[in-house]
Image (cartoon, rainbow, N blue to C red):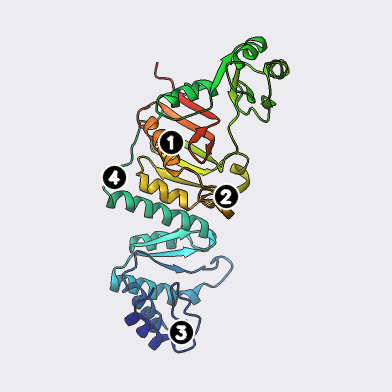
Amino acid sequence: DISSKQTSSLKDVLGPIVTVSNPLDYHTFIWGDEEKMEAVYSAIFSDRFDLNILIMDIPPTDRCDASAWNSALYALKQAKKKTDANVAMLATLPENLSEALGDELISLGIVPLYGMEEMILAVDASIQAGKIINHKVEPVIINSCKSDKFEVLDEAQSKMELAKHGIGSPQSETANSPGEIATASEKLNFPVVLKGLGIAHKSEAGAVTLNLQDSTEVKNAAEKMNATTGFLVEEMVPKAIAEILVGITRDTTGLIMLTIGSGGIMTELLEDTTSLLIPSSREEITKAIRKLKLSKLLSGFRGNSSADMKSLLDTIEAVQNYCLNTPNLIELDINPLMALENKSIAVDALIKLEKTT
């Protein structure tokens, strides 16, 4: 909020009709009065906000006379000079802030921002960077890919890798032929799910069959399935309290990002995700989850059971630890991670690694 001292100063300049609040709409009563406009800007800037943003769309000068905006620009520059506050100027439409003016603003220590959505992303990135600096936690940087050679582990291989780091998955068996997978399925508790290996998008390709009740059904399903490298059969997991996406990505700079969000069929439907730089603390991961729409499900929505948050956080931290111990990791995707009452289980997983030799 604006301090009481600054509120009083602003009301003296703006009069009783204007509501003084944050953000401030100072209306047009003082437009063109450079002295009063500077007083308003200086009063706001003097409150030492982390960032002050003046929103102003200046019309293209090739078709319009933009001289009416000169008073606001003058007041902005003078207030910046007087207070040395952190100041930015936002054009909600990028074309309404010329390159020449942007360069001039930069020379005066004023940040030009082009577009509302871009502004939000830029400010959020600054906040996240500030948190890293303040906590003295350096983000992990792995060398960017040295070549375009990589390998993608299939679902069974990916789950075996993750299991070494304590990430649970359903009891399973693998085999190369319909007959072999049917025999292997008898070691499990029915019902089971059958999946074809070597296929990126198994559901879309018809390479997943659920609720198979015996080995005969497993064999029949396998004979109808296109599987390029074999079959995976797993025990069915109970209905989850929530299905969660947990992903790791490494960009071209080597920075690693942890993404958490709504998983399963809700991934594209809700677009409910949040991302953190690795490493992130358990507290930061917890706060990120609480921002998601699915957090209501995890805490027991409308009288339903709540998820085992300790197990969920343990699993996400285990994913992060796997990443930190795998320098050639390019991408990891668990979708969904089933959050249950007493545990969390990775139902589907994929790992992409850079080939080091």
Q: Between residues 3 and 179, which one lies in front from this camera angle?
A: 179
**In the image, 83: left or right of 278?**
left
Q: Residues within 10 Å of mark 4 (few under 14, many from 20)?
A: few
The quadrant in which the C terminus is found is top left
Looking at the rendered structure, the kind of residue marked 3 is Ile
Pointer 2 with pointer 3, Cβ within 8 A: no
Residue 296 lies, in percent from the top left, at 53, 52
Q: Please name the residue that numbered disc 2 is placed on.
A: 304
Q: Nearer the viewer, mark 2 or mark 1?
A: 2
Q: Whole-Å distance between the Cαs marked 2 and 1?
A: 22 Å
Numbered badge on residue 137: 4
Structural distance between the alpha carbons of marks 4 and 2: 38 Å
Q: Residues within 10 Å of mark 1 (few under 14, many from 20)?
A: many
Do the residues under discs 4 and 1 have CB atoms within 8 angstroms?
no
| Dot placed on the residue nearer the N-terminal end, 3 or 1 | 3
User: Tag 4: residue type?
Assistant: Val
What amino acid does circle 2 point to? Asn
Q: Which residue lies most toward the left here?
A: 136
* 241 is higher (above) or lower (below) than 87: above
Q: What x and y, as percent, mark residue 64? A: 57, 70
